[in-house]
Amino acid sequence: MTSDLHKIPKPNGGVSTDTATLTRLNWRLALASLPLVLFLVVPLAGLLLRVSPSNLVSSLGEKQVVQAISLSISTTLITAFITLLLGTPVAFVLARKKFFGRTLLDAIIDMPLVLPPAVAGVALLITFGRRGYLSPILGGMEIPFTEVAVILAQLFVASPYYIKSAAAGFASVNHELEQAAAVDGASRSQIFRTVVLPLSLPSIIGGIVMTWARALGEFGATIIFAGNFPGRTQTMPLAIYIGFEIDLRIALALAVTLLAMSFLVLAIVKGILGQRLAVL
């Protein structure tokens, strides 16, 4: 009864003291949030306003830009596929199995998320390079400064995004549903295909999309391990880097393109997660 007193309007039609205080608090919070929000919005808006549609279209038609976009899309799709194929078992193990060293494995998966990309590039170079630790096993195979190096760099820095998201999805599945399927005679593989996988699908899709987006924006590990060779290893971020030294128009066009792709990815992921929350 007492907790509802603030909901009763005053006899003179005015606003209650609690409501007025809450309104002032909301305005103060909004004003306190404004500087950082503007700091994030203004540079992005400035980038969009800096490039005219005509210049954007003409720049995207140039050979160097087409090569960078084509290489970025092809390598990131391969990276996403490999991550889905090899990362799903890792995610399932982290979500469902208890074993010695699980915490260490989880920490190793998290390392690329906090490790500077340049360090990742150096680590890949000394591992897969001509005189790297795995060079005897590779039999003289040239990996650095090739398209394969681009994919490995993307895989190293981006795959944890999928593993963490998929693991969270697998862990959220109600075990009672799996037990009910087992009682009905379903095998473990059938339970995974018909119960676990469908219920985890939003997290899996969200994780693979975020992995693709992170791979698309990868720069530090790629430039050290794969180099910056147009038509061979020059992805969109690397072309932007060179563009600032050679042709600012190309750099701006690619930056706007990456911005649009990133926004689309966020819209997809938030839409998927939003639908999942609504269902739950």
Image (cartoon, helix red, strand yellow):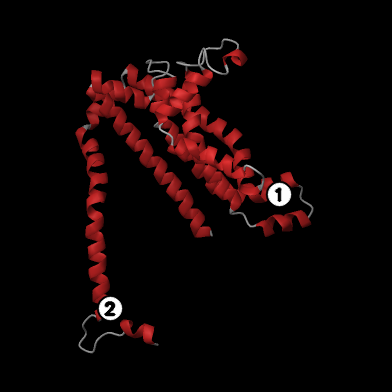
Residue 79, percent from left and from top? 51, 29
Between marks 1 and 2, how big is the CA–CA gap?
A: 53 Å
Which residue in the protein does label 2 denote?
A: 18
Coordinates of residue 196 in the picture (x, y in percent): 64, 49
The image shows residue 104 at horizontal and vertical percentages of 57, 41
Q: Which mark is residue 24?
A: none
Query: Could you say which quadrant of the image residue 103 lies in?
Result: top right
Q: Position of residue 92 (x, y in %)?
A: 63, 44
Q: Secondary structure at mark 1?
A: helix
- Tell me if 163 is positioned left or right of 194 in this view: left
Residue type (three-letter) at the residue carrying disc 1: Ile
Q: How many marks?
A: 2
Residue at the (25%, 50%) spot, across then down? 36
Q: Amino acid at mark 2?
A: Asp
Where does the N terminus fall, quadrant-wise? bottom left
5 lies above or below 131: below
- Is 99 above or below relative to 115? below
From the viewer's side, name the closer residue of 31 and 94: 94
Asked whether residue 208 appears in the rendered view, the answer is: no
Q: Earlier in the sequence, mark 1 or mark 2?
A: 2
- In the rendered image, the quadrant that contains the C terminus is bottom right
Looking at the picture, tell me which residue is in the foreground, 130 or 1. Answer: 130
Which residue is identified by label 1?
191
List the single residue furthest toward the right.
Answer: 185
Q: Residue at x 59, y 42 (%)?
A: 91
Tell me where residue 19 sits by quadrant: bottom left
Query: Considering the numbered disc 2 on the image, is that residue within a helix, a strand or a loop?
Result: helix
Residue 7 shown left or right of residue 24 in the figure: right
Q: Nearer the viewer, mark 1 or mark 2?
A: 2
Could you tell me if the residues under marks 1 and 2 are in contact, i.e. CB atoms within 8 Å?
no
